[in-house]
């Protein structure tokens, strides 16, 4: 059965819907809000689990609860299935140096290789701390061997403790919520598909120059950035270096994103070498929201900005001094712009309007893993 989507007026749908099988399609159904947990609710649920673990003075009960917490954390942050977590052997299937989980497939062979899922450094440390020095042999191997019915019961209890409907805490709903969160945080759709273990994305047109290794590297950069929380930039683009043009002092770098957008940035030659940038390297490009200028499209558009991205106004948050715009690009990427409310009044933009988001090459900051 095909997922139902809805269009309003002439505005194109620019986001993602989750089908009944948990797969992601290229439409994001905003009417599905409430059927999954948003980032704030996921954080509340995680805190509830942690408080529950710390609420008992008994060491045996604390250990049992911590096992449930680890199962929750893996599903919440990676989007893997409950049965995939419960079949893990942490000694064999978790590489703590590379920070990856090797997911076991019942059809694991040359035609169906194991997939790897990226972990954050914090989650790796948490799992490793529970194993090292406390668990040995079979006890370590069986860390995740827990009755699935018992796991579901505890997930439901924590959801209800947060005031959510218990079904919102179900493992499959956490997986769906993670998928939505990844898309909303601008991880490209093919990368989300790979991370959640869906069939290999069809890398046609703009995706054709990205290999599976490129997409895996994109996921790693995203997880590191998400976990670190060390940047105030609202806009992130994941892509790879398409061309460089080096001058005496600075270098012009052209990126192509997974969605087919081309971005231009200018960095110093020292930064070029420090970041190890070369054609084909996967990088993250960041742009702060106040550096993004909005302009209505038209034949007479004239600007010195090297980067011009066309999209649709999805949300407007008007304040007394500044107004925030969320622009959705055709590939689903969200671009945030903050301009003065006086400028917003002159532009007279409304939700659903076509708009150009512009920023110059010196506004783009590159990050390399």
Image: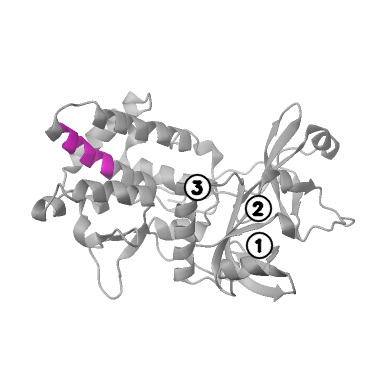
Q: Secondary structure at mark 2?
A: loop
* Labels 1 & 2 near each other (Cβ < 8 A): yes
- Coloring applied to the structure: one colour
Question: Where on the picture, by quarter, is residue 56?
Answer: top left
The residue nearer to you, when weighing 25 against 228, is: 228
Name the residue rendered at 42%, 53% in the picture.
23
Q: Is residue 91 above or below residue 46?
A: below
Which residues fall within the magenta stretch?
61-70
Label 1 vs 3, first from the N-terminus: 3
Q: Secondary structure at mark 1?
A: loop
Q: Please indicate whether residue 195 sits to the left or right of residue 188 in the image.
A: left
At which x and y percent is residue 122? Answer: 36, 47
How crowded pointer 3 is (Cα within 10 Å; few <14, some 14-19, many 20+) is rated as many
Q: Where is mark 2, residue-wise?
A: 329
Distance between mark 1 and mark 2 Cα atoms = 9 Å
The mark found on residue 17 in the picture is 3
The mark found on residue 179 in the picture is none
The mark found on residue 261 in the picture is 1
Q: Nearer the viewer, mark 3 or mark 2?
A: 2
At which x and y percent is residue 107? Answer: 24, 67
Most common secondary structure along the magenta stretch: helix
Distance between mark 3 and mark 2 Cα atoms = 16 Å
At which x and y percent is residue 323? Answer: 73, 34
Name the residue rendered at 43%, 49% in the picture.
19
Q: Please indicate whether residue 191 sits to the left or right of residue 96 in the image.
A: right
Name the residue rendered at 54%, 66% in the picture.
282
State the count of labels. 3
* Residue 124 magenta: no
Label 1 vs 2, first from the N-terminus: 1
């Amino acid at each position: 059965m095909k997922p139902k989507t809805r269009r309003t007026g002439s505005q194109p749908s620019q986001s993602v819907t989750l089908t009944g099988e948990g797969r992601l399609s290229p439409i994001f159904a905003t009417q599905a809000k409430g059927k999954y947990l948003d980032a704030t609710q996921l954080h509340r649920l995680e805190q509830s689990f942690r408080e529950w673990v710390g609420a008992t003075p008994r060491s045996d009960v604390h250990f049992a609860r911590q096992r449930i917490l680890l199962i929750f954390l893996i599903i919440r942050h990676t989007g893997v299935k409950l049965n995939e977590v419960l079949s893990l052997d942490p000694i064999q299937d978790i590489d703590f140096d590379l920070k990856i989980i090797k997911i076991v497939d019942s059809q694991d062979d040359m035609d169906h290789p194991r997939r790897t899922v990226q972990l954050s450094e914090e989650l790796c440390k948490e799992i490793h701390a529970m194993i090292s020095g406390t668990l040995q042999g079979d006890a370590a191997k069986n860390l995740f061997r827990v009755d699935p019915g018992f796991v579901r019961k505890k997930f439901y209890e924590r959801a209800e403790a947060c005031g959510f409907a218990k079904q919102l805490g179900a493992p499959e709903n956490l997986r769906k919520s993670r998928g939505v969160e990844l898309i909303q945080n601008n991880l490209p759709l093919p990368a989300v598909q790979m991370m959640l273990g869906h069939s290999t994305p069809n890398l046609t047109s703009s995706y054709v120059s990205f290999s599976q290794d490129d997409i895996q590297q994109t996921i790693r950069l995203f997880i590191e950035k998400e976990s670190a929380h060390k940047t105030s930039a609202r806009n992130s683009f994941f892509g790879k270096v398409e061309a460089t043009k080096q001058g005496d002092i600075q270098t012009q770098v052209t990126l192509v994103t997974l969605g087919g957008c081309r971005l231009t940035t200018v960095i110093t030659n020292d930064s070029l070498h420090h970041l190890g940038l070369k054609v084909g390297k996967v990088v993250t490009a960041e742009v702060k929201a106040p550096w993004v200028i909005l302009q209505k499209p038209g034949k007479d558009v004239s600007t010195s900005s090297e980067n011009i991205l066309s999209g649709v106004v999805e949300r407007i948050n008007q304040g007394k001094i500044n107004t925030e715009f969320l622009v959705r690009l055709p590939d689903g990427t969200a671009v945030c712009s903050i301009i003065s409310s006086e400028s917003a009044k002159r532009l007279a933009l409304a939700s659903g309007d076509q708009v150009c988001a512009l920023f110059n090459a010196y506004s783009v900051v590159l990050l390399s893993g």
